[in-house]
Image (cartoon, rainbow, N blue to C red):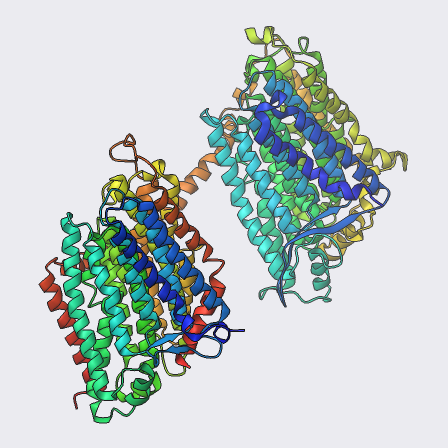
Amino acid sequence: MPLQTQLPTWTAIAPTVLLGLTALVLLLVDSVDPDSTRPTALAAVSVGGSVATLAVAGWYLLAGTGQVGGAIRLYGGSLVIDGLSLFFTVIVASVVAMVSLASHDYLQDRTYQAEFYSLVLLAATGMSLMASAGSLATVFVSLELASLPSYALVAFLKKNRGSVEAGLKYFLVGAVSSGVLVFGISLVYAVTGSLLLSDVATAIGDAGDFVGVAGIGVVMIAGGFAFKTASVPFHFWAPEAYEGAPAPISAFLSSASKAAGFAVAFRVFAVAFPLDAVVPMGIDWPLLFAVLAVVTMTLGNFAAATQENVKRMLAYSSVGHAGYALIGLAALSGGGPNGDVMGASMAHLLVYGFMNTGAFLFIAMVERWGLGRTFEDYNGLATRAPVACLAMTVFMFSLAGLPPFGGFLSKYALFYGAIQGGFWWLAAVGAINSALSLFYYSRVVRAMWIEDPVDGDGVDLGATPLGLYVAVLIAAVGTLALLPAFGPVVETAQSAATALFA
Amino acid sequence: MVGAFDYAPAIVLLPFLSFVLSLTAGKYLPKGGAFGGIAATAGSLILSAWVFLTVSAGNAYNETLYTWAAGVGEGTTTLTFGLLLDPLAAMMLLIVSLVALLVHVFSLGYMNDEGETGLPRYYAGLGLFTASMLGFVVADNLLMAFMFFELVGLCSYLLIGFWFREEGPPSAAKKAFLVTRFGDYFFLVGVVGVFATFGTAKFAGEAAFPVIAEEALAGGAEVTTFGFAPETWFTILGLLILGGVIGKSAQFPLHTWLPDAMEGPTPVSALIHAATMVAAGVYLVARMYGFYALSPTALGIVALVGGFTALFAATMGVVKRDIKQVLAYSTISQYGYMMLGLGAGGYVAATFHLLTHAFFKALLFLGAGAVIIAMHHDEDMWNMGGLKNRMPVTYYTFLSGSLALAGIVPFAGFWSKDEVLYEALIHGLAGSPLLLAGYAMGLVAVFFTGFYTFRMVFLTFHGEPRTETARNPHGVRWNVKGPLVVLGVLAATVGVVNMVPLHDLTGGFPPEYLHDWLAHGELSALTSEHYGELLHDYAGYTSADVASYVAGAVSLALALAGVLTAHVLYNVADPDEHTAKLGAVKTLWYNNYYQDEYQIWIAESFVLPLARLADKFDQGIVDGVVNGVSSVSLFAGNRIRRIQTGVVSNYAVLLTLGLTALLVVFGVLGGWFV
């Protein structure tokens, strides 16, 4: 029996509310005790809140909330709870839990810890809302709610030039992109007279002479989402922000924030701009995303291949992965297996949430140890930290899409879905890019396991950062476990996506 | 009822267990795991004897035990492991486990008492070697046989290269591995061919591939022959499999690995030559004799290769200085006889020679091993002499083995070799010049065999000691003498099982035990009776009427002539190097007809340039494309990197331009601006 028949309908929004409440609790703690030196308590609240969110969202997802018997619409349809929103809430909550756990060690001896955690959770609240946004107004507001704390978080290391510079750049590019997005929304509103996605869908078919206005609006909205997902040509902030930000924040932004960007993009485009209505009018948005996907994955992978700095390499690889995920919006056609393609893309984002978060957290650990940032600095690390390096090897090979890791199956499902939909060339470009990506991912592995350390092995790594270690291991186990567990995951995602197109 | 057949898998598993034990815990075991090996092979021997007795009672066993790849649907094949225990397998099990046991015991004297290191590795190798050979013997299908055949090859590699820190052994091991692998390659193609043709590779039963082949020739079954006539195709398959046989049984031209394999420890040589590695090739032909018997061409080639090898190797044995080298060439020569026997339609004769040879060759190698211990690991016969009085047990047992090898009545080798030649003669006279040629070569080789064998005996044991070491040899213990005595007795007496000339002369006494043993059985398609019918019906073999004792007398006379020549030349107090008088022929023989040289020449002038070409293709074209792609990628990556200038206003410009470009392109495409 679906939950909504037993609980009041407003409880469907509970996961988002939980995230927001946790943020407020953290702020409250900070207000009561502003000079708090209890980092463990703060981290515990943060981890606890996100795990609770994860539990509730996971429970809803399994129980069929918003899936059996149709989506749950709240507040006049401006919020929609369905499989897609819950699925992405699960991704966001998992990433937040791992990041919070890791931040406990990363933030050691830094001030403003409570602010850090509450900003992370506020951003997560925004991301969760993005996944549930049912109207273009909610889309914009939630997107800003996710973005504004992110700017602050990137610049969190106030005394670090790179961090502050990255934060400012992120903010400026973000401001431009928000402008583009909101302009696009206004154009669509101008044509359709509504902000609700379902109403837009019915009205856009009658755009008539205003098809150009609608088209420009659609492309600009796509641009706004491209900013959030770090896709070309709105990706410029990403390498710098990921490199300059504290590594847990890089993990958070590149995994959760990107996933949320895709969540909102999936919903808006699948619901508001139905393929059958808009493509014949000349608004061929799958083609637009196909172009973006090819350019994004190619640019991301090629740029990643020439980096010397591991964190920057991962930043570009994150751009590349945005390109793979874009296939979920590109390989669509009227009557094609659209739900399967988009579902595969969602599943890939979930796996990506674990493997990419894990990789950035490993870098956080390396930063904590005070080792350098280039590939050479990783030389021979395996002799000193074998378990962590094993986990990193899992992340790297999984990111490259090698079996037997989760990333293999998710990429396989994605490319397979694209081929099923008749977009074999997209899958081919994706496969070639994956092959290229193996080059730079394996560089990390080679440095860690094969190369000899440059400065001898005398340097002591210091105390083991327990929280970081555990977070990295959770990510590694998740990456591995998603191989056998991939079947149910992709089925859930595909049924959630199919519901959007229905 | 639980019988011998239910325990038969243990025959293979016991030595395997000894292998595992020696490998994992050999360091902690007394004698480096030797006792485990002895116990395991003794267990195998007892079980083999039990199987032998059960088979004697007229039983046979042909069961699939494990299916490791099940074919689903039409036209697929199922790959299995199973056991086939018939008279041939039972006899071979007895030989292998007995020789393996004696070799294990002898190793106590040769390896442990000599203070060798790495004993767990040695005994692990022996265990696995024995297990692989036993597994090969009981295999019920060609693929399983192939797998164990390869395992045997691997073990020979491991054991020949046992002293891997020295220069020679690793190289000899590599050579043995590569040369036999060259033959096995054809074997593998043959196995695949058999599967493709018949859909099964089972040796025995209703749907065995020799049975299907027979039906196909009789027009009763349809098989895939890839456009060839069935006769031609079966000959091709037979010859492909023969590739593996020629490699393993060291037949011309793939015999070159075997003399080099003398670099391994001497007990290993005994095992390789008598019971395991080299015997595997001949056993394989015997195992699937029902298939070879269908193709007169394949049989003719087998016989010719065998006869030629017998003579060819015997001549080289004449001039060697090293005692083990003489034995090595004698092995090649003797296996040539077995091949001649098989090719000539003498299935029983060849099997008989396999049996007697296993005992007398194991004996000779172990005897040589005892001599080598005594001589402080000097193997040059010219440094020996006069050892007869100093090590009598070794001398008399070695003499027994030598008489058997030379083919002197009544020692075992006489009966078996004589029967091989007799079969070649009668089938040759009935209209097969190919077999007659084989017979002629085999007959000439008898003289050489007698000569080189006794040259070896006289140089080693007779005359005056030629060095200080030979005057005061190192003593040997029971663990060396025991196996020698057992084998010495067997070499002298085992011929009793099949004294054909005597049987014919006396008109029926004593019975031909081995003929009767192999002629009947529960699996009628695997009996010599059935093979005789096949040879007659398909290969067109008929027999001329020649009395067996006449043929026997001829070969005995030749053997005695050889022995006498050796006696005259070498059985003196201080023999000269008479072979030097052979001049250029000696040089040719001493250098093994330059076989190694021409094989190296082939390798260097054909294979190497081809390999270089492949390397060029790989380096230049394949790698070139790959490298090209990667440099283009890296170059492009570098360019792309430069877009990221770090100046935020540039980003804003690029972003806006990108968006504008998208808007314009899609606007034009979608007709938004009309």
Q: Is residue A341 above or below residue B569?
A: below
Could you say which is closer to the camera, residue B216 or residue A270?
A270
Q: Is residue A233 left or right of residue B648?
A: right
Q: Is residue A429 above or below residue A397?
A: below
Q: Is residue A347 left or right of residue B488?
A: left
Count of number-bearing discs = 0
Q: Residue B175 location in percent, x, y? A: 49, 36
Could you say which is closer to the camera, residue A433 or residue B205?
A433
Could you say which is closer to the camera, residue A444 or residue A129?
A129
Q: Residue B270 location in percent, x, y? A: 63, 28
Q: Residue B38 location in percent, x, y? A: 69, 27
Could you say which is closer to the camera, residue B460 or residue A33?
A33
- Which residue is located at x 67 percent, y 37 percent? B337
Q: Is residue A18 left or right of residue B287?
A: left
Kindly tell me whether residue B632 is visible in this rendering: no
Q: Which quarter of the figure has residue B632?
A: bottom left
- Which residue is located at x 22 percent, y 46 percent? A111
Q: Which quarter of the figure has residue B559?
A: top right
Q: Residue A189 location in percent, x, y? A: 23, 84
**Quadrant location of the C terminus of chain B in the rendered image:** bottom left
Kindly tell me whether residue A228 is visible in this rendering: yes
